[in-house]
Amino acid sequence: MPIEWDPAARQWHLRNERMSVILAVLENGELGQLYLGSALTPGVDYRHLARGPFHGWENRVGAPIRLELPTPDTGDYRQPALAVDLPDGSQAMRLRVRDHRILRGKPALAGGMPATYVEDDVEADTLEVDLVDERTSLVATVRLTLFRDHPALARSITVRNDGDAPVTLRTLMSASLDMPGADWERITLHGSWVRERHVTRAPLTPGRYATESLRGSSSLVASPFMALVRPSTTEAAGEAIGVSLVWSGDFLADVEVDQYATTRLRMGLHPDSFAWHLAPGDSFTSPEAVVVHATDGLGAMSEAFHRLYRSRLARGEWRDRVRPILINNWEATYFDFDEDRIVDIARVAAELGIELFCLDDGWFGRRDSDDRSLGDWVVDRRKLPNGLETLARRIRDLGMTFGIWIEPEMVSADSDLFRAHPDWAIGVPGLPRTESRQQLVLDLGRTEVVDHLAGALSAILSSAPIDYVKWDMNRTMTESWSGVLPAERQGEMRTRNILGVYELYRRLTERFPHILFESCASGGGRFDAGMLAFAPQAWTSDDTDAVERLRIQWGTSMVFPVSSMGAHVAAVPNHQTGRITPLATRAAVAAFGAFGYELDLTALSTEERAQVTDQVAWVKAHRETLQRGRFLRLIDPFAGNGNDTAWMCVSDDAHHAVVGWYRVLSRPVPGPSAVRLRGLDPARRYQVRVWPETDDTLVRRNSLVRGGDELMTVGLFLDDEPREAGVRGDFQARLFELEAV
Ligand code: DGJ
């Protein structure tokens, strides 16, 4: 039984083969967090783990320091997981365990929160513990699900007001982990537009460190993810605890080290932009946090996220399918196109083996630039006189499928929608609205807005054979105020907005189950687990430069699988950096993602067309391993001078693997170097092939049959001759294919 309740010890032990989580009712009735780590023996009383430093002089004699749901103002001076403005204005509560339930499977979350799921009740067990503050009748239910096949715990909280006066939720943290000791380093992901999810690692120090977003979305700048690792943890060895939030709006993740050197990690809705009014009888359910524990390195932590998120967070017809190779016209044409121009690009794409055409921004309203027409989801007949249907059919006749770009959550001031419903745009009456990209955010907390968008977009999506949608979102939120909420509920506005986005996604994905949705937010500005619950892939970054992409894709892979990362080959000089990289290098980077092209294919030379034909064929031949195999990071672009990067994908049966190796600048007199592989079968022998098959020492030295053991201990040869670089020139890459013989 994976969840063991020991009535004598008053202890719960959630356990699978790799992970244990232990909770207990403490002497004073509070819910204590005893342990989270690798699997411990069942049937054992672990209450002794509750001992430790005490806040004795703070009048909490006997209250241990590790709490499941800490609240403020009762002696634990660290940051709380739950803070409520109670009817008399105080915040002090005594939350005591009243009840618990052990459930087979995993219940869906209330209130429209996306979450991980099971397909069969045997895949997980769930513990729900009700805590009650007797004085105010506030009930908090902590919900913990441990998966059978993943070292992963899902946690959410529901707070219900059983009292007879309203209260306001101020802080509600989906994750709150109390760890003994502070011998950890934190890993977080940061960036900006065209530089998303760069990895930062630093030791914990006394005090508090936060990573957060108050931009209305999870953002380009920070990510709702944090890992704690031991100082000695590497990709392949050592302890790692990763926490990821299934939420796409404002968030706070922080880690606090107190005077006893204990560590508290929290993650959840950002308390600065969240306040939820709970009338008597009302309840609110937090987003879900997913906690992964790994003993064998950061790579194992990421792999657990990849497997869980790919199979039990993503959903729908596309979840388990390899992704079509796509051509997107954005960087080829921007807003300047017409039907024939699009068909010209599509014709070349079809000849090269590309499978799907995405018509990006500019096909609707009078959208000749980004300062108008968002909200007017009707075809621009000046550009597409025969409508989407004819265009889609012409592309289908070429043997490809067709999809479109939309940005449903926004409205341009210059649009028919805004002229008809100015009050649908978010803004504070009497205050100018801050504009960003000349657009405003629609209030998706209003049902009529969601209804309108669902109607308008359903009409478009059923007007033509559309198999793919790129759902963009291009601005942050400001002047947050909703015309349909009373003053005491304005603190709910940003949360309701994201719930409205989810509701719109839910309606469209249910109505059009065959459509592959790709989320996007000025690139990877909303690449989060909440979006992945609706769209199985996301546009990773507007930065299509192959060199920049190495770090972006490496950082994104901390949590997200290869199949979820939209990655395209673009033109050179690159539109974001001006860098000129070889076509082969651009493809070798994009191959480790949902692969596609984003350039004017009609402008390619004959030789380049031949190369693209080759690339497309190569990705088709290997995408099962690339998108559905294990992804392992090998050489870290954030380490040292970042000149080399390597990663690999290996099939679950270890029969087949693909390795990508990338070098930014060529160095003279390099000396011998190699990249050691992981995840192979040490007892098998592999035929190694290098692609592209250029005439250089790297290809000659590596095209051999070698043992899995040797490839994991010695590795593939990068430079061999001390005086001659294996690969010459800057911005080089090679793909290695390994096949068991
Ligand atoms: C931002 C996206 O990230 C781009 O790929 C492109 O779709 C533009 N928006 C279109 O406006």
Image: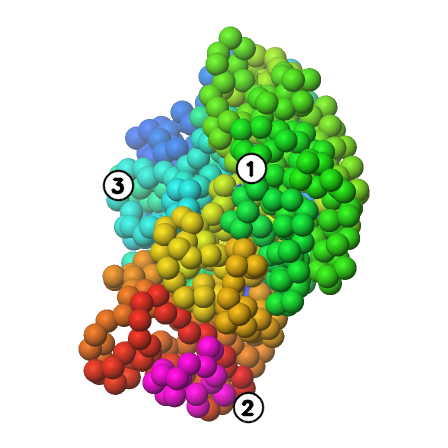
Residue at left offset 42%, top offset 42%: 193
Quarter of the rendering containing residue 452: top right
Residue 702 is one of the magenta-drawn residues? yes
Q: Earlier in the sequence, mark 3 or mark 2?
A: 3
Residue at left offset 36%, top offset 34%: 78
In this rendering, position of residue 22 left or right of residue 546: right
Pick the front one: 340 or 234? 340
Q: Secondary structure at mark 1?
A: loop
Q: According to the image, label 2 marks what residue?
A: 741
Looking at the picture, which amino acid does disc 2 mark? Val
What is the number of the mark on residue 473? 1
Point out the image quarter for the C terminus: bottom right
Q: Where is residue 584 drawn, in percent x and y? A: 45, 69
**Mark 2, mark 1: which one is toward the viewer?**
1
Looking at the picture, which amino acid does disc 3 mark? Pro
Quarter of the rendering containing residue 662: bottom left
Residue at left offset 33%, top offset 50%: 200
Q: According to the image, label 3 marks what residue?
A: 206
Per the model, the C-alpha gap separating discs 3 and 2 is 54 Å
Magenta-highlighted residues: 687-704
**Mark 3, mark 2: which one is toward the viewer?**
2
Per the model, the C-alpha gap separating discs 1 and 3 is 38 Å
